[in-house]
Amino acid sequence: MGSVNATVAPPTESNVILSFRTFGAIVQSGFRRYATYRQAALAGAVTNIVFGFLRCYVLLDAAGAAGVAAGYDRAQIATFVWAGQGMLAVILLWGWTDLADRIRTGDVASDLLRPVHPVTSYLATDLGRAGWACVSRLLPSVLVGPIFFDVHLPARWSTVPLFVVSATVAVVLCFGCRFLVNATAYWLQDVRGPQLLWTLGSGVLAGLYFPLPFLPDGLFMALQLATPFPSLLQIPLDVLVERDPPGVQAGLVGVQVGWAVAILALCRLVQRRAERRLVVQGG
Amino acid sequence: MSVIEVRELRKEFTVRVKVGRLRREKRTVDAVAGVDLRVERGEMLGYIGPNGAGKSTTLKMLTGVLTPTSGEVRVCGLRPVPERTRLALRVGVVFGQRSQLWWDLPLRESFDLLRHVYRVPAAEHAARLRRCRDLLDLDAFVDTPVRQLSLGQRMRGELTAALLHGPEVIFLDEPTIGLDVVSRQAVRGFLGELGRSGDTTLVLTTHDLADIERLCRRLVVIDHGRVVHDGSIAALHDRYGSRRLVVADLDTALPEPPELPGAPLLRVEADGHRLVFALESAGVAEVVAALAGLAALRDVSVVEPDIEDVVARLYAGKEGPLVNASGIAGAPS
């Protein structure tokens, strides 16, 4: 058995490089894990597209003959809807209960036995999942929308890279929010209550059901700055449709980054508190 | 220095018990109530106890998953809870009822991911994986997603996953639970091989005492959160008076029950054609020779004491001589 139980040699490369490699490997495995469910991805993409038509027609109707609603013209509305339909799966606003399920069954013990912090490990997996969702969910929506509607194409060179940054931060932030909702299982066991609140609240406040500028200006601003929800969907989509000048857009992405850092820090804090009072279910 | 050092380890859980119609009362349950343990490098330790005795809770505290209420724990010189991620690089854990593999990925990809997670150099990883593949016969299913594996196949995958980073200590929590005979033998054979090398310390929790008998020289029995036995299996047999038996089948029954020094007669069966003796100070050869001088022997067999009976008695809190499950008395009753 000599080669099986030889003790690990100390790593010769720097810890930072190794940490990046580990993170990258978990991201890749996240992509592969979710890519195994292709039929589910197809069903999801079809659903996104069907609801895309519904939402687009409703919002275009709201724009009416003037062709403008809450500051969006018809092309911006179409882009907002179709990109939003794809982004919904990329940030995965709903339907993630992996952590809560593992807490309920006690399998979370296996997560704690790895030499990677659970928040880091789950985040890396989620980024891999988001990568797969870009291919399987975002792409179909942004390809189908322009076939049937006039869409707004970015006019500024900075829009696309800023949108990529904004969307990536939104994925990280949404992961953090979902992690927190799931982590309530450490205390409650059953997360259906928090999950329901999250589903109801996030759909409205993130700008999925309607663009938040439909609300009074003061309320919209307050939501955008004082809650993380608009940073999940509204801000990336506003960046994409170039609703604001570049400076304001960059500031909004800054708000997103602030929220992402705060929520991830809270995730680590909650995880630490939870581990102290953890009762692993089952034997 | 011992690989595992545990002093006065305690874990209390608070449960709410319904009192009356609406009121609930907090009660404290001692899952582990003052365990002391010292395990040396290369030891193979069986850690057993009835359901709810505190075995898995102890293992979870030793691996840093649970925070002890009080007490001192050092594993590989590290404090498991505050230094959990460092400790994870030096220990391997297999929970028979949980999986550390990724459900959606084939075993090969799970192993590759573990190489990155544990930061194992590629050559070392390849060598260990090759060895595990040979010993655990993984080749037939190494490309199958974990969710499609049978329990036995998955468990072989779990063992490999726990060993790929070359841990100094391996904690096994019921690794053979639910396995068929072939898989169980494969797992036992593998663990036996691992233990014989002497480098790896193995702590095995199980309800299958055959695992313990075949693998562990030292047995720690825990009950109600306390260690009730710590020693060899032979010492446990001594404590409970369980002895080897000699069963002699005679051609013709003897008129009087024989008295052999150092081997009391326990039972006379089959109208005097079968005599059962317990070996105390006498050896098998002496008893057989003495019997051969008294009567014509048709058959003689030696029955080893059954550890299950001893442990059942230990769990039940009964000290003293034992009658084993097969109905053959282990001591005069």
Image: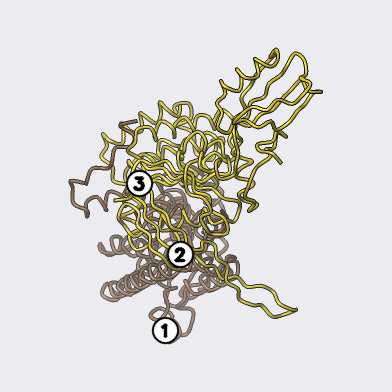
Residue under label 2? A179
Please give the count of numbered marks on the rendered protein.
3
Q: Quadrant of the N terminus of chain A?
A: top left
Q: What's the residue at 69%, 30% (across, down)?
A: B265
Task: Check disc 1 and report its element: helix, strand or loop.
Answer: helix
Q: Is residue A276 left or right of residue B55?
A: left
Chain A's shade in the image? Answer: brown
Q: Nearer the viewer, mark 3 or mark 2?
A: 3
Give the letter of the chain under mark 3: B
Amino acid carrying mark 1 in the image? Ala
Few, some or many residues within 10 Å of mark 2 (<14, 14–19, 20+): many
Cβ–Cβ under 8 Å for marks 1 and 3: no
Specify whether disc 1 shares its chain with disc 2: yes
Chain letter tied to yellow = B
Rounded to the nearest whole Å, what is the CA distance between mark 3 and mark 2? 40 Å
Residue under label 3? B40
Coloring scheme used: by chain
